[in-house]
Amino acid sequence: MAMPVVREFTLPDLGEGLTGAEVVRWMVEVGEVIAVDQPVVEVETAKAVVEVPCPYGGVVTARFGEVGQEVPVGAPLVTVAVAPGPVPEDVEPAAPEAERPLVGFGVAETRRAGRRRVAPGGAAPAAAPALPVAPVVVAPPAAVRAPAVLAVISPLVRRIAREHGIDLAQVAGSGPEGLITRRDVERAIQQAQTAPVEVPRGTDEELVPLRGLRRTVAEKLTRSHREIPAATCWVDADATELMALRAQLNQVPGPKVSVLALLARICLAGLERFPKLNSSVEGDAVRRHRAVHLGFAAQGQRGLLVPVVRDAQLLGTERLSVELARLTEAARAGSLGPAELTGGTFTLNNYGVFGVDGSTPILNHPEAAMLGVGRITPKPWVHEGELAVRQVTQLSFTFDHRVCDGGTAGGFLRFVADCVERPGMLLRGL
């Protein structure tokens, strides 16, 4: 019988100059049979959370890295015992789950098609290549220690343990050769429920390490604050007519136009008049960008993100609204890719959604400018010589003083405010 070949799969280069990623969730267990290109681990980079597929099919013999640990690019993730010859596409169903543990390979729950398990007793299905009964465990490098191989248990037992937060490594098996049974896990659950709760004594402080996205954001904001001589100016604007225009646009069939999309279209018109602001500083030179890759602040599962609408200057208001909605939903779902979170040239920050009026944000390095929009709320306002209640917002504009002076920044902000108050100025561009 031909022996399997052990293949080592390392963390690939995930692009965007990333040097490592943090393990968020393991998707396979040691001893599990996996298919080619099956995701084995979910990792968090500085840009997004992604699933990493393994190019080898076979038996997982070792995993490297605990949840929360950062793995460098090129470091081992898993080792896989690959059977010689092609792996068949047809998959044998697992044997029925029973009270007793299953013996052999492939005991973890099947998570997706293409994964197969070896039947009890160590006998492989006829269509599958022969594999040795004992799992192959490869010694990990000294820098990373692979987790110990647990006694083989049934998928049902694994699920029960996982749902109740039971660490199987801490459970003593009462089955043959120390195998863990369902009764062992249920006994551990009962002990955990009746165990006295330890009340922490002393300090109630917690030291939370900056990892993944939060560390990247912290480094970027620190660099921006340190390198960019930023200044901020602001103005109040009457947005009553802008809100009325939005209501009119949404009375006709088709995609609904958001306030953010109208503000984005106004920003794009302003950047066309003041192109200096769509730029970034590189050493002793200023790079002026022809295309506007518009970033906007969006709250996601991982905190505040800045998705980017590429070539936004080519989109009308309706298409802008659709794209902004798509990226916002992707941010909430945590499904944004690295390419959708990088490359911005100008940022629109609608902090009014948090119920605040003003802000002096830190620029999104290396961008040179950011428009902030506060909440739109009823306020007393002098309109046409009389005091009236109008929908008022505060606009703030932060800019890199190396790129332009106050006249350019003030001119851009005044143009934006005028468009908010009299959006008819942009009807041709809408």
Image (spheres, rainbow, N blue to C red):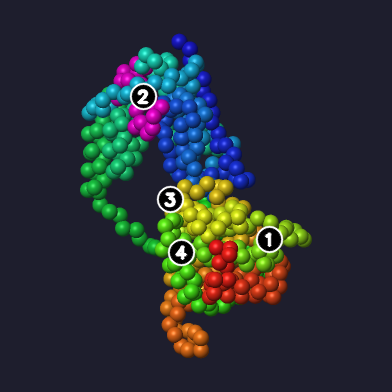
Please tell me the numbered disc located at residue 333. 3
Question: Distance between the Cα atoms at labels 3 and 1?
Answer: 31 Å
Of the two numbered discs 4 and 2 on the same chain, state the one appearing first in sequence: 2
Of circles 2 and 1, which is in front?
A: 1
Reply above or below: 234 against 278: below
Q: Amino acid at mark 2?
A: Arg
Of the two numbered discs 3 and 4 on the same chain, state the one appearing first in sequence: 4
In this rendered view, identify the residue nearer to me: 62 or 47: 47
Segment colored magenta: 102-124
Please tell me the numbered disc located at residue 279. 1
Of circles 3 and 4, which is in front?
A: 4
Q: Which residue is mark 2?
A: 117
Please tell me the numbered disc located at residue 251. none
Reply above or below: 80 against 233: above
Of circles 4 and 2, which is in front?
A: 4
Q: Which residue is mark 4?
A: 249
Question: Residue drawn at (65%, 75%), measured in percent from left and top?
Answer: 410
Residue 210 visible (yes or no): no
Q: Quadrant of the N terminus?
A: top left
Q: How many numbered marks, from 0 up?
A: 4
Of circles 1 and 4, which is in front?
A: 4
Instruction: Specify few, some or many for label 1: CA neighbours under 10 Å numbering under 14, 14-19, or 20 or more.
Output: many
Q: Main secondary structure of the magenta part?
A: loop
* Relative side of 96 to 60, left or right: left
Q: Amino acid at mark 4?
A: Leu
